[in-house]
Image: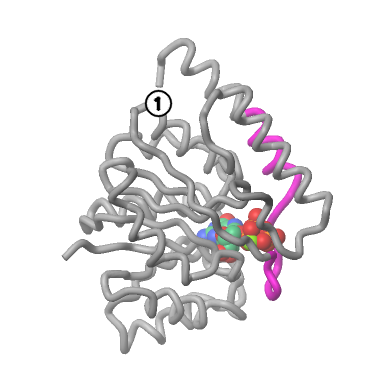
Amino acid sequence: MPKALVIIPTYNEVPNAERIINEVLQQSDIVDVLIVDDNSPDGTADIVKKMMETNNRIHLLQREKKLGLGTAYVAGFKYAIQHQYDFIFEMDADFSHNPKEISIMLGKMDECDLLIGSRYIKGVNVVNWPMKRLILSYSANIYTRIITGMPVHDATAGFKCYKRKVLESINIDSLRSNGYAFQIETNFKAWKKGFVIKETPIVFVDRRVGVSKMNKKIVYEAAFMVWRLKARSIFKTL
Ligand SMILES: Nc1nc2c(ncn2[C@@H]2O[C@H](COP(=O)(O)OP(=O)(O)OP(=O)(O)O)[C@@H](O)[C@H]2O)c(=O)[nH]1
Ligand SMILES: [Mg+2]
């Protein structure tokens, strides 16, 4: 039986934590959840620990302070490799990503090595985002595609499934970025290694509860990362 791990980084997600974990676990018997919590002041980790008392499919990595989304995923990837999970998901806690997609995505993993839950194939599937943010995200993706040449329509998406061999091959310790750039960087490295990347349409819904961690720094980081990846690939130092 293959095993899948859904990695959910959390920072102050008390309003979402219990429900997202339960809904993810309901999707398939082969799925475990790993919460990577950065010592959320609201006590998110306490909810997870309580649930772990009665459910061994829930796992928790606790870090001492807010260290960012990218390194949270790297920590989760290492856990997944160490525990030999076959399929590894990235997912947000805030219900922007519908847990129901998990089984659909698992069903498509025989066609590819990395599957991206994409907002921008088959039209624009984003609900409740301010127009400004949609334009930013959409144009960031066009910019990324033009500069890197990577054939991906939603390179900044955070709902993804990797086969373990992808994570074992892309040198996850070298991943430096934290926000949207992290997603671009992982896709780019997988693509350069020759892995098959596919996209599956998802509907992305803006968070309803809890607080956003989006900021300008994340945008600049991504804008800069695209050029760094391009330069690195030209000089073949990847
Ligand atoms: N462990 C950890 N998790 C984080 C950190 N920053 C954000 N997260 C989590 O990462 C996921 C995505 O963060 P969001 O704040 O939803 O970011 P976003 O989707 O770009 O923005 P909004 O949906 O508008 O809030 C959520 O589950 C957050 O709780 C962090 O520094 N450490
Ligand atoms: Mg979100």
Question: Is residue 226 rendered to the left or right of residue 50?
Answer: right
Q: How many marks?
A: 1
Q: Left or right: where does residue 165 sit relative to residue 137? A: left
Image quadrant occupied by the C terminus:
top left
Front residue (pair 162, 238):
162
Q: Which residues are magenta?
A: 206-224
> Does residue 65 appear in this view?
no
Q: Is residue 89 magenta?
A: no
- Ligand 2 position by quadrant: bottom right
How far across and how far down the image is residue 38, in percent? Answer: 52, 63
Question: Outermost residue toward the bottom?
Answer: 54
Residue sitting at x 60%, y 27%: 226
Which residue is found at the position 28% from the left and 50% from the top?
110
Is residue 194 positioned above or below 136 on the image?
above
Residue type, mark 1 in image: Lys
Residue occupying image coordinates x 40% and y 26%: 192
* 207 part of magenta stretch: yes
Q: Quadrant of residue 108?
A: bottom left
- Give the labeled residue for mark 1: 192
Secondary structure type for disc 1: helix
- Tell me residue 147's x, y (percent): 62, 22
